[in-house]
Image (cartoon, helix red, strand yellow):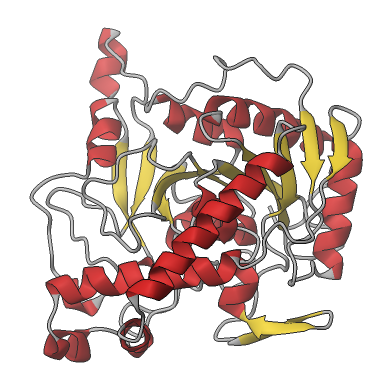
Amino acid sequence: SERRYAEGRTRPLEGLIIGVKDLIDTQGLETSYGSAAWRGHAPTADAELVASLRERGAIVLGKTTTHEFAWGVTTSSMVFGDTLNPLDPTRIPGGSSGGAAAAIAYGAVAAGLGTDTGGSVRIPAALCGVAGFKPTYGLLPTQGIFPLAPSLDHPGLLGETVDDIAILAGAFSIDALADRGFTRARLGVLREVPPVPASAEVASAFDAAVATLGELFACANVEAEGLFDGTYEAFAHIVLTEGGAGHFRHNDADRIAAHYSRETAERLERAKAMTLGEYAAAQQTRRDFTARLHRAMARVDFLVLPTCPCTAPALHESAIRIGAWTGTVREALMAYTAPFNVAGFPAISIPLAPRDGQLPSALQVVARPGHDGALLRVARQMEQRLRTQAPASPMR
């Protein structure tokens, strides 16, 4: 890269240091998919995404941790150790792309490649105070990425800011400057996703952000009641069915028992009980929700809502209480992100500065499919406006 700069032959991403999630193949560099079952595995070729970035001058510094096979939101591992949140090492970074978000927040890399099946880029971005982007379903290639649930899997991009993500996205013809169709964007505001309420600190930060954005954009409340009905349950059924089918196709029971974590093995046991009828019903729920979401966005250009209903949970915490609602950490963290994997809509998480020493929360912005460039452009405007209004953060 130094020679290319000296000779005036620089490529678009010349010298950009990135981390690549351990779910994504990197030629000659160990890729274990977060599992002891693949320890020592060195792919013979790069994933298509990685090859594209290398061709444009990016440098892969190394692999970033993932929950085993990306099937979890904590990025914890009995084999490789728990990934810690750099803002508070007693807490999780989120997952399953937790290593990428933690590395960016810590300052080890400028940006990273991740994957997002139910929020796995946006959740860790939110909990670690960085930015995370999931494009429209099918826009980025998945060749060379270990699948979790193929009809939900999205490659994703992470960076310290939206600008960092936009630089990476440009390598895949997602141009934040080209789509100028939303000169006066209309925002649909969703304060929460039933039945999971937003915690007091998240609600306060979100309301303050919306008030600030209201000076720049036209804002209108969107009715959440009934919009998300059955969506999380359908998501869970699809993941179990497609995830189970993928693992059972490639592994026998002895290999799973010997090398998979107990958590993943237990999920695969539940997957055995899934029926084709249940999968068909989940897909119908998916179609119904997608139609409702299109109708809900008919009079707005973008939705804004919290990325997660709470800040980073403590390490090894299994259940969480928010107001009168109690559920698993997985249910809480994915409640606000998974619906947009189900529908395939592009979504980005941008950090909200923490107040009074609290951990950061984040704003999620959602666009209709195909408006990825406009989403990045609007998210950049939002991030800049919110940054100028935010108090200085003692954590960054």
Dividing the picture into quadrants, the one containing residue 153 is bottom left
Q: Residue furthest left?
A: 44
Q: Residue furthest top?
A: 8
Which residue is located at x 27 percent, y 11 percent? 9
Residue 159, image x, y percentages: 52, 43
Query: Foreground residue, 245 or 315?
Result: 245
Q: Which quadrant would the N terminus be assigned to in this image?
A: top left
Residue 8, image x, y percentages: 30, 8
Residue 112, image x, y percentages: 42, 46
Visible in this render: residue 17? yes
Q: Give the mark count.
A: 0
Q: Is residue 233 left or right of residue 322?
A: left
The answer to whether residue 204 is above or below residue 220 is: below
Q: Is residue 375 left or right of residue 142?
A: right
Which residue is located at x 79 percent, y 60 percent? 225
Which residue is located at x 33 percent, y 64 percent? 148
Dividing the picture into quadrants, the one containing residue 50 is top left
The answer to whether residue 188 is above or below residue 216 is: below
Residue 182, image x, y percentages: 70, 20
